[in-house]
Amino acid sequence: MRHLSIENIMGYVDGQAQGTDNAAVEQHLIVCSECSELREELQGLVSRLQQESLCEPPSEIVQWGIELFQPVIQPASGGKIRKFIAALVFDTFDQPALAGMRRVGAPPRQLLFRAGDVDVDVKIESMEANDRITLVGQVLSSGAKFFDNTPVKLESHGIVRYKTRTNLVGEFSFDEVPKDTYHLSVDLPEGQITLFCVHRANS
């Protein structure tokens, strides 16, 4: 099942989706528990930020919301860890299969995420026999900088399940982890980059 993008869900939550788009989103949310759960989380954030002026949300919540949706990396200030959401710019899942090409089993899925001048290239290979996946990737910069010994984490259901570090050329690997919905985060000196739904449980 094709899942909704964060942009689609936010448009629905904000009431900015067009009539036909709105109906399509509602129909999908009825049958997809993962997208419905993500909508509830985003709705909760929006609700906190839309409280009456007499009951202003805490300043740290407002700042967290602003930083969460920053499109580019900015220097950290005041000792706080800045957080950024990486945008998905390429996904082989969305590309049409080559005519006449045959393959045994599902092909690896290649994704490219971008946050500012940092790219995170991810390849996911599914092992149907034991219901696990292998996720490998590389953290790159347009400035030809390698991010070596950089912490990379896989998070599921709000808990960090697996941790690793990049090698000398920014590569990392999570071998044969159980299938689940994972968010991947990369801890750079400038801040933490999050790749939302880098893998979904039923993908």
Image (cartoon, rainbow, N blue to C red):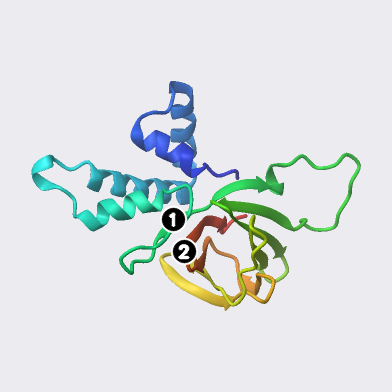
Foreground residue, 67 or 184?
67
Callout 1: SS: loop
Foreground residue, 17 or 36?
17
**Where in the figure is residue 93, as x and y percent of width and height?**
69, 47
Look at 50% across and 74% down and name the residue there. Answer: 161
For the C terminus, the quadrant is bottom right
Of callouts 1 and 2, which one flags the residue occurring earlier in the amino acid sequence? 1
Look at 42% across and 49% down and name the residue there. Answer: 70
Of all residues, the one furthest to the front in this rendering is 143
Look at 53% across and 75% down and name the residue there. Answer: 162
Name the disc covering residue 1, or none. none
> Badge 2 local density, few (<14 within 10 Å), some, or many (20+)?
some
> Badge 1 local density, few (<14 within 10 Å), some, or many (20+)?
some
Q: Which amino acid does label 2 sit on?
A: Glu
**Where in the figure is residue 113, as x and y percent of width and height?**
60, 53
For the N terminus, the quadrant is top right
The residue where tag 2 is placed is 190
**Where in the figure is residue 160, as x and y percent of width and height?**
46, 72
Q: What residue type is labelled 1?
A: Gln
- Determine whether 167 is above or below 48 in the image: below
Of all residues, the one furthest to the right in this rendering is 100
**Where in the figure is residue 33, as x and y percent of width and height?**
46, 49
Q: How far apart are marks 1 and 2 (CA)?
A: 7 Å
Callout 1–callout 2 Cβ contact below 8 Å: yes
The residue where tag 1 is placed is 74
Foreground residue, 42 or 181?
42
Callout 2: SS: loop
Identify the image quadrant of residue 132. Answer: bottom right
